[in-house]
């Protein structure tokens, strides 16, 4: 029997579990260079990133269609998803080393992450009627730190085997799932949607407030994961020597992880000026960074490192606030489905962006490719304002 927790204690445990569970997300990216050598298959970063995103898309689509986070206990869904994702990650070490097996395992990791990230937000939303922007700021901050964590393991250069990265991230995910499964009950503001309704999804996207928040989130997703996926390559370009070493992974960790801090600070400011303003400012700022990066090559290291850190701050800060606006745009019994559906579409957009970036590298340098990401924030801001200014149909 789980003990009844205060909302503050529950949030702390959810944040810890979210961090541990999402450490699986970029674990494949952190070991991609080693896997490329073993499999004699160069350029695995974009492929590994995309199969995880594809798995996540399919997972969130199935979860949304069947309203799993709203029909079943979100805590149980999180627990079983974390265990399953960890096991899929470990299969890369256990099974014969073949490209198809590696990609299939990473696909399954992405599939079960659908029960960790959006479901974790759903659990948090069920604990908070007020201050949701701050709560989700902490939660998405944990996701960002979890995403960056494999780069830290690799960047410490402690002669860790690539297998140890996968073992450690899987162990962390199992521990995170256990925290939710054994200690965090469903929130006091949870409203159960007990029936399956196939017409729910099209009805949700007739809600103007939801379309506005989702549009901003989609603009963020066009930029965010593509930036994270190619940060190490961008660092090598700016260094100018073409040599990859452990410091690249360490700097990649800081560039991504600093976004976790900005998510928390963004939630703090959202309580004072509102989620809408924080999200808009961050999305506009990251769009400006996209443009500025094309001028950074050849600058002193402190300047381009500073730019990457600022970009890392801004590129993550809008995500929890757009998710807050999504959660607030629908009735509580549909909140989990709305969050999962918006995540599904957002990550589909990220795959298109990542693959397009990889394709453009045949003709452009990585800084030029990433400069084109400004299209996402610009479009997201325009659509966010457009739908936000329209009156809700009655």
Image (cartoon, helix red, strand yellow):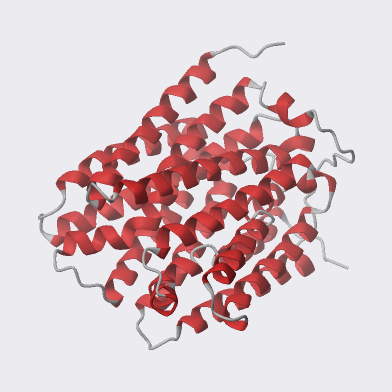
- The quadrant of the rendering that contains the N terminus is bottom right
- Left or right: 169 in relation to 153: right
Instruction: Work out whether 268 lies above or below 84.
Output: above
Residue 117: x and y, percent? 62, 54
Question: Residue at (69%, 59%) from the top-left corner?
Answer: 10
Residue at screen point 10% across, 55% down: 298
Q: Look at the picture and state if 154 lies above or below 359.
A: below
| Residue 336 screen position, x and y as percent | 72, 43
Q: Quadrant of residue 325?
A: top right
Residue 264 visible in the current orientation: yes
> Is 282 on the left-hand or right-hand side of 89?
left
Left or right: residue 292 versus residue 214 is: left
Task: Point out the image quarter for the C terminus.
Answer: top right
Question: Which x, y percent locates residue 366?
Answer: 26, 52
Q: Nearer the viewer, residue 183 or 156?
A: 156
* Extreme residue toward the bottom, this view: 159
Residue 146 in picture, x, y percent from top left: 51, 64
Is residue 132 visible in the rendered image? The answer is no
The structure residue drawn at horizontal position 36% and vertical position 67%, both measured from the top left corner, is 42
């Amino acid at each position: 029997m789980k003990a009844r927790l205060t909302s503050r204690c529950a949030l702390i445990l959810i944040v810890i579990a979210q961090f541990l569970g999402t450490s699986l997300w970029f674990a494949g990216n952190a070991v991609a260079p080693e896997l490329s050598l073993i499999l004699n298959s160069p350029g695995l970063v974009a492929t590994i990133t995309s199969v995880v995103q594809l798995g996540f898309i399919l997972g969130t689509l199935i979860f949304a269609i069947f309203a799993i986070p709203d029909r079943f206990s979100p805590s149980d869904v999180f627990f079983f998803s974390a265990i399953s994702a960890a096991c899929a990650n470990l299969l890369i070490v256990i099974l014969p080393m073949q490209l198809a097996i590696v990609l299939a395992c990473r696909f399954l990791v992405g599939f079960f992450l659908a029960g960790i990230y959006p479901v974790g937000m759903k659990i948090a939303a069920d604990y908070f009627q007020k201050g949701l922007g701050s709560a989700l700021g902490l939660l998405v901050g944990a996701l960002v730190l979890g995403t960056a964590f494999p780069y830290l393991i690799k960047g410490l250069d402690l002669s860790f085997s690539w297998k140890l990265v996968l073992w450690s991230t899987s162990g962390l995910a199992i521990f995170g799932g256990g925290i939710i499964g054994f200690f965090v009950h469903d929130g006091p503001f949870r409203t159960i949607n007990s029936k399956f309704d196939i017409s729910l999804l099209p009805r949700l996207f007739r809600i103007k407030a939801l379309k506005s928040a989702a549009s901003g989130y989609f603009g963020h997703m066009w930029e965010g994961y593509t930036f994270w996926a190619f940060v190490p390559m961008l660092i090598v370009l700016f260094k100018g020597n073409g040599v990859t070493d452990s410091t690249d992974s360490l700097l990649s960790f800081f560039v991504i992880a600093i976004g976790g801090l900005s998510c928390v600070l963004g939630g703090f400011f959202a309580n004072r000026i509102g989620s809408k303003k924080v999200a808009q400012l961050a999305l506009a700022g990251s769009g400006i960074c996209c443009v500025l990066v094309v001028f950074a090559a050849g600058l002193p290291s402190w300047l381009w490192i500073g730019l990457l850190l600022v970009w890392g701050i801004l590129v993550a800060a809008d995500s929890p606030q757009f998710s807050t606006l999504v959660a607030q745009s629908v009735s509580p019994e549909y909140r989990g489905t709305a969050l999962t559906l918006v995540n599904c579409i957002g990550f589909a957009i990220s795959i298109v962006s990542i693959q397009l970036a990889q394709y453009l590298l045949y003709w452009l340098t990585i800084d030029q490719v990433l400069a084109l990401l400004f299209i996402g924030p610009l479009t997201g801001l325009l659509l966010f304002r457009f739908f936000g200014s329209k009156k809700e149909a009655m």
